[in-house]
Image: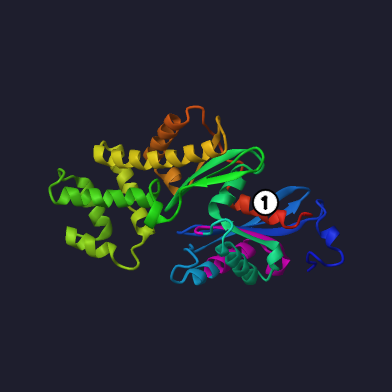
Amino acid sequence: MVLPGDADEPSLRREDKPVLIAGFDAGQTGTRCRISRSELGQLHRLGSGAGPGVSHLDAQQGEQRFRRAVQDSVSAALVSAGVNRDDLLAAAIGASGIEQGTELQGRAAALLAEELGLPQSQVVATGDERTALRGAFPEQAGIVLISGTGMICVGRDGSGREHRCAGWGWLLDGAGSAFDIGHQGLQLSLRMADGRLADHSFRQRLWQELGCDSSAAIKACVVQQEFGPAAFARLAPLVAAAAAEGLDPAQQILNRSAASLAEAFKGVATALNLNRPNVVGHGGAFAHLPPFRAAVENAVAQAIPAASWCDPHGDACDGALHLALDRLRPR
């Protein structure tokens, strides 16, 4: 395999020379890997694979989870694509918890390079919000709102300057995420159970989902080590369903969470001087909770009336592939 720095590096970096690259989208609940061939400036998808999610690298088992996510997803993608790991020339990963310009970014890049057997100069590690932005708007200005287990907002102006708001972890800044919706829903159920609010079948459905029959059981459930943000997020569909059925306190939860997303969106637009921004919504909460998406669209319209929702050019894996391809271009 010819590597940058070798004698015939210029031929490797010619735009018309086909190269194989890997792009990863690693969230808290799952990881996707896509392998593509780049030829004449176009990406041709060859195969894809899935793996487990990641956590913050400094969390318990953080590095091990990162390695397993890369190993499992790339192994499946290589089989799907019918190629060997040695055929890959560059890779990029957008992973939850990696902050731009921090020591974590370098650690993640080193782990990715080690797992794929690539020089670190040919890999990129960044936050999954950055790959989502690059995928949605490869070269254009725009803003991406992400609401899945966690949430974050990031945008780019016409000169390439980027800015992010929110997304500082579920313990500090989870409002606007599926975790937030599920967490508020569970709080609502406790208020119903002890008489602060009228009881409702929503509470029974929520508790049945957790296998609990009392407030004390709920309290014991959520303090278990394995009950993290993803477990709260799995309750969000029940809150959205209750809102769709007309339960006003459930709709209020969606509205509050949507308002937090709109606040982050306005912060990014203001920082980048984007008065008529294009915006793309990403994440499971957008894709699978229609009442919540409607609440977000309404909140965004109130925050910046001239904002325009649009379809993304590509997804976060596409964004990672573009970042990987950047590593093979002359700098």
Q: How many marks?
A: 1
Q: Is residue 57 visible?
A: yes
Q: Please, is residue 198 above or below residue 212 in the view?
A: above
Q: Please, is residue 148 above or below residue 122 in the view?
A: above
Q: Residue at x 43, y 39 (%)?
A: 263
Looking at the picture, tell me which residue is in the foreground, 139 or 201. 139
x then y, percent, for residue 124: 64, 60
Q: Residue at x 80, y 56 (%)?
A: 13
Residue 179 horizontal side relative to residue 197, left or right: right
> What residue would you read off at disc 1?
322
- Please state the extent of the stretch shown in magenta in the rendering: 68-97
Q: Residue at x 58, y 65 (%)?
A: 108
Q: Residue at x 44, y 43 (%)?
A: 286
x then y, percent, for residue 311: 56, 37
Which quadrant would residue 35 be assigned to in this image? bottom right
* Amino acid type, callout 1: His
Does the stretch in magenta take in 37? no
x then y, percent, for residue 55: 47, 63
Q: Is residue 247 visible?
A: no
Q: Secondary structure at mark 1?
A: helix
x then y, percent, for residue 143: 55, 40
Looking at the picture, tell me which residue is in the foreground, 226 or 106. 106
Residue 103 horizontal side relative to residue 5, left or right: left
